[in-house]
Image (spheres, helix red, strand yellow):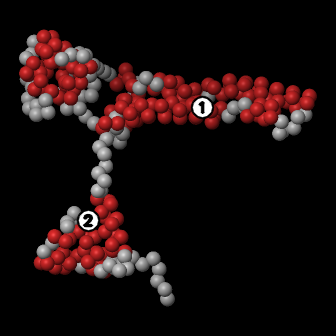
């Protein structure tokens, strides 16, 4: 979710632990003006103030104005980022949430995820795992040769269990990395979500559909009530004239042609 100018200015000030009074002393702009820039009913900010605040906070004017999400690197060359054409097209396409992608990449544990992913993709851990498995196999073979304990022996079973599947192990490590980062991101955005109201439109539609399906209900009245639910109309408050017109219009609907769904017919 993009931040407004007010939110960006307030966040920058709070990040530095400054009060409006302290900021006034630093930038030589009045406290009342600074406060108005952060207020919800903010209307305008002068070019002078934008430049002054952008310079003080060390960010770009475009960032303050909401024209860019980049605070400190307005003219970075794509070549310096080593982005492929496919990646650039993806970022420009809008198919993914670029802000969330940036948060993912900026997470403190992201380098560890990338390191583990690189190890898995390049097969770096394969040889080490194979060496470890070879030692386990050699010990197991020695025990079998000297003592022949049988496959149900607890100690032999421990050695067999110690045999590592490098593919499963690496994917498990990567999954743990992703889980940790995902939980942190969810926690950081916990206050972004709005609670779902108890009386949802879906609940009302399901209730109306249930009325239509009931054998003891008037099919025509139940179907009209269902249509009203979808249109967010209170059927009981309609006048007789309005109900008559609703019925006339609704006759074109399949709901009135076959209001009671039949799961099967008896011959």
- At a point 26% along the width and 77% down the height, the residue shown is 221
The residue that disc 1 covers is 170
Residue 230 badge: 2
CA gap between label 2 and label 1 equals 50 Å
Image location (x, y in percent) of residue 30: 7, 17
How many numbered discs, if any? 2
For the point 92% across and 28% down, which residue is it? 146
* The quadrant where residue 96 appears: top left
Q: Residue furthest bottom?
A: 267
Q: Is residue 107 left or right of residue 132?
A: left
Which class describes the residues within 10 Å of circle 2: few (<14), some (14-19), or many (20+)? some
Residue 15 vs residue 55, the one in the foreground: 15
Residue ID at (20%, 24%): 10
Q: 159 left or right of 142?
A: left
Quadrant assignment, res 245: bottom left
Question: Where is residue 90, by image quadrant?
Answer: top left
Residue 88 on image: x %, y % = 36, 33
Left or right relative to 231: residue 172: right
Q: Residues within 10 Å of mark 1 (few under 14, many from 20)?
A: some
Measuring 34% from the left and 35% from the top, which residue is drawn there? 189
For this view, does 262 lie left or right of residue 123?
left
Q: Does the rendering let one see residue 238?
A: yes
- Is residue 108 placed above or below 41 in the rendered structure? above
Of badges 2 and 1, nearer the viewer stands 2
Question: Whole-percent x and y of residue 74?
Answer: 26, 22
Label 1, secondary structure: give it: helix
Image coordinates of residue 177 in percent, x first then y, are 51, 30
* Mark 2 / mark 1, whichever is N-terminal: 1
Viewer-closest of 42 and 155: 155
């Amino acid at each position: 979710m993009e931040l407004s100018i007010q939110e960006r200015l307030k966040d920058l000030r709070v990040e530095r632990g400054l009060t409006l009074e302290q900021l006034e002393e630093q930038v030589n702009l009045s406290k009342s003006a600074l406060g108005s820039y952060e207020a919800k009913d903010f209307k305008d900010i002068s070019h002078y103030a934008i430049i002054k605040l952008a310079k003080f906070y060390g960010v770009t004017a475009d960032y303050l104005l909401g024209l860019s999400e980049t605070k400190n690197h307005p003219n970075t060359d794509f070549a310096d980022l080593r982005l492929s054409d496919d990646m650039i097209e993806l970022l420009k396409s809008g198919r993914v949430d670029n802000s969330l992608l940036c948060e993912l990449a900026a997470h403190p544990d992201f380098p560890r995820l990338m390191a583990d992913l690189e190890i898995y993709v390049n097969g770096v851990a394969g040889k080490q795992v194979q060496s470890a498995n070879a030692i386990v196999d050699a010990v197991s073979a020695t025990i079998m040769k000297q003592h022949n304990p049988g496959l149900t022996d607890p100690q032999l079973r421990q050695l067999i269990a110690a045999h590592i599947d490098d593919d499963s192990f690496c994917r498990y490590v990567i999954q743990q990395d992703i889980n940790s980062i995902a939980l942190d991101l969810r926690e950081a955005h916990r206050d972004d979500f709005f609670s779902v109201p108890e009386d949802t439109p879906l609940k009302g539609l399901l209730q109306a559909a249930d009325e239509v399906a009931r054998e003891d209900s008037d099919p025509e009245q139940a179907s009209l009530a269902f249509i009203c639910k979808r249109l967010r109309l209170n059927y009981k408050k309609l006048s007789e004239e309005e109900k008559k017109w609703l019925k006339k219009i609704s006759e074109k609907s399949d709901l009135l042609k076959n209001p009671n769904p039949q799961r099967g017919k008896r011959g």
